[in-house]
Image (tube, rainbow, N blue to C red):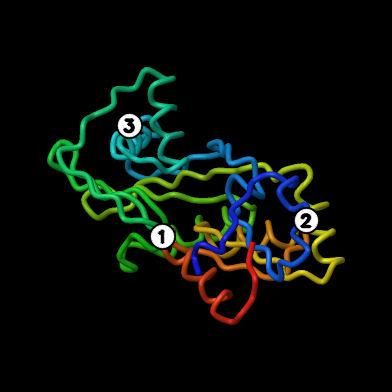
Amino acid sequence: RSSDLVIFSEPSALENLHNMQAFVFDKTGTVTLGKPHLKDIFTTNITEEEALIYAGSAESKSEHPFGKILSSICKSKNLSIMEPSEFTAIPGKGIIAKINNRKIMVGQIKLFDPKMITDKWRKQIITANKNGLSTILLSIENELVAMFSFTDTIKSDAQNVITSLNSLGKETILLSGDNQEVTKQVARSIGIKSYLAELSPKEKLDSIQKLQNKGKTVC
């Protein structure tokens, strides 16, 4: 049952949980500090400032950490935030908005029509992901114009917690809405044995439910 799930963010919450068989970790904010910062901006046919304005404006109503960062950067640089006339948040994918009567999309690669992802863009995305960076794309009127790359810091005690669980024979699983490459790198760096990436919030809950349906006690 979903009520059997215990959600924790501090290692101390692991105490006296010896009866648990599987430990599921959400990457951002549990394994990492959950305080990502913007590492790089790649643009075509648009300036970095314009990219920040459009992305920050589209994300101004978003609760996603990356969206909040982009909006915050706009404010810190005194860049004008434009109010979207339309705004739709798609969980696990990104934002579709209308600004100045132009269709703006900000989100992960799966938000966009595959035809929009040219070889040049795909190369940029793959390179960033292999370097451990999470990527968010920006399109204007169905044309990709910018990629924002973010990095986060793994908590200092995360590896010790996972090592202890592995030594007890516990199953460890990392769940993330992030891309496959970054999720894999984080999992391997701290010794988590399996991972699932590119998940929406609902898919994360479904993954936990599947473990419970197998009769496993899950934390």
- Spot occupied by residue 163 in the image (x, y as percentages of width and height): 83, 59
Q: What residue is shown with label 3? A: 53
Instruction: Say whether marks 1 and 3 touch (CB < 8 Å).
Output: no
- Spot occupied by residue 21 in the image (x, y as percentages of width and height): 71, 71
Work out whether residue 217 or residue 11 is closer to the camera in this orientation and state it. Answer: 217
Q: What residue is shown with label 1? A: 109
Amino acid tagged 3: Ile
- In the rendered structure, the answer to whether residue 69 lies left or right of residue 97 reads right
| Quadrant of residue 116 within the rendered picture | bottom left
SS type, badge 1: helix
Amino acid tagged 1: Ile
Vertical comparison of 151 with 185: above or below: above
Name the residue rendered at 54%, 60% in the picture. Answer: 126
Rounded to the nearest whole Å, what is the CA distance between mark 1 and mark 3?
Answer: 20 Å
SS type, badge 2: loop
Instruction: Single out the residue that lies furthest toward the right.
Output: 167
Name which of mark 1 and mark 3 comes first in the sequence.
3
The C terminus appears in which quarter of the rendering? bottom right
Name which of mark 2 and mark 3 comes first in the sequence.
2
Vertical comparison of 161 with 149: above or below: below
- Spot occupied by residue 185 in the image (x, y as percentages of width and height): 68, 59
Q: What residue is shown with label 2? A: 16
